[in-house]
């Protein structure tokens, strides 16, 4: 596998588990130094240690993305220890069925907590990484949205719709610094959390009746899209949200 991220530093929020962990391992395998940023510091340290044991460069940093000061401190630590940030993946987020309740049902403190992480967290991390990316000649930011943003009226869907909006806003704002900003909107993925949280009948309906590709999405599908959008191969792509969802939903 080519080392297309050799000499690059990637800052991954929610990097201790799930997509974040897969992103870190894939980027490390292609030459990047990886900062595992997570609210769960022991979990982040465990993943960083695993990468170090495999011969990669990695650093664990504690980071609650909703806490502006803690984000600034985490980015400063990465700049000090690894030299800067070239790739930011805004992966940390709240999800699961409880956030798909109507706004009038989900307690207001839960709505606020959801938006603090899923929306303000993207703002905090993107703004915190801008200076170091500029100093290194530019970079790539990747946000994780969701197909739930399309036509959704739930708090979760609206939070992910806001991520799409932030992707466009930051693509404009950061363009003078040669920083590209894109997003991925995963569909129904075969992750443990998703399969444990959703009724089997809903999963089957999604795959068989709504998607055009009749299989569950995999971690590898999202990782492949991430590697493209964060690499120089996507140097002419910014402000876009790429659906990786088996063809659901399509629109003109």
Image (cartoon, grey):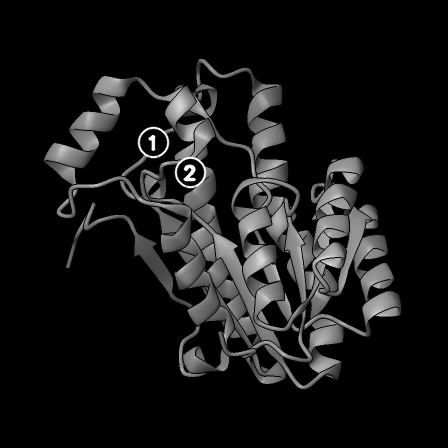
Q: How many marks?
A: 2
Residue 131 figure quarter: bottom right
Secondary structure beneath label 1 = loop
Is residue 38 rendered to the left or right of residue 95? right
Q: Is residue 230 left or right of residue 77?
A: left
Position in image of residue 81 (x %, y %) = 87, 66
Residue 202 to residue 220: above or below: above
Decide which of 152, 223 is in the foreground and name it.
Answer: 223
Q: Is residue 247 visible?
A: yes
The residue depicted at 62 percent of the width and 68 percent of the height is 87
Q: Which residue is mark 1?
A: 153
- The answer to which image quadrant residue 113 occupies is top right
The part of the image, by quadrant, that contains residue 93 is: top right
Find out whether the residues at labels 2 and 1 contact each other: C-beta distance under 8 Å. yes
For this view, does 55 lie left or right of residue 227?
A: right
Q: Which residue is mark 2?
A: 158
Question: Taking 75 as reference, is 42 above or below it?
Answer: above
Q: Give how far across and how far down residue 214 sits, in percent.
A: 15, 42
Q: Measuring 40% from the left and 62% from the top, which residue is drawn there?
A: 224
**Residue 154 coordinates in the image, percent (x, y):** 38, 28
Q: Is residue 200 left or right of residue 237?
A: left
In this view, 220 is above or below 149: below
- Residue at 69 percent of width and 75 percent of height: 133
Please say whether residue 166 is visible from this viewpoint: no
- Quadrant for the C terminus in the image: bottom left
| Cα–Cα gap, marks 2 and 1 | 6 Å
How would you rate the neighbour count of disc 1 (Cα within 10 Å): few for under 14, some for 14-19, many for 20 or more? some
**Which circle marks residue 186 in the picture?**
none
Which residue is more in the foreground, 234 or 208?
208
């Amino acid at each position: 596998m080519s080392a297309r991220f050799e000499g690059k530093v990637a800052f991954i929020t929610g990097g201790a588990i799930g997509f974040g962990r897969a992103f870190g391992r894939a980027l490390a395998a292609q030459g990047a130094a990886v900062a595992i940023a997570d609210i769960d510091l022991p979990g982040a340290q465990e993943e960083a240690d695993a990468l170090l044991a495999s011969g990669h460069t990695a650093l664990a940093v504690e980071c609650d993305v909703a806490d502006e000061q803690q984000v600034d401190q985490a980015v400063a630590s990465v700049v000090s220890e690894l030299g800067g940030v070239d790739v930011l993946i805004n992966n940390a987020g709240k999800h699961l069925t409880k956030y798909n309740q109507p706004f009038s049902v989900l307690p207001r403190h839960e709505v606020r907590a959801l938006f603090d992480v899923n929306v303000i967290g993207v703002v905090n991390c993107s703004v915190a990484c801008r200076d170091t990316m500029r100093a290194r000649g530019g970079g790539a930011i990747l946000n994780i949205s969701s197909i739930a943003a399309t036509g959704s009226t739930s708090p979760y869907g609206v939070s992910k719709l806001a991520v799409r909006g932030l992707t466009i806003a930051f693509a404009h704002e950061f363009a003078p610094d040669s920083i590209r900003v894109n997003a991925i909107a995963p569909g129904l993925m075969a992750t443990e959390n998703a399969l444990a949280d959703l009724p089997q009948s809903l999963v089957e309906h999604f795959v068989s009746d709504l998607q055009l590709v009749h299989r569950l999405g995999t971690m590898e599908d999202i990782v492949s899209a991430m590697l493209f959008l964060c690499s120089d191969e996507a140097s002419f792509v910014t402000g876009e949200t790429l659906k990786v969802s088996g063809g659901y939903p399509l629109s003109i």
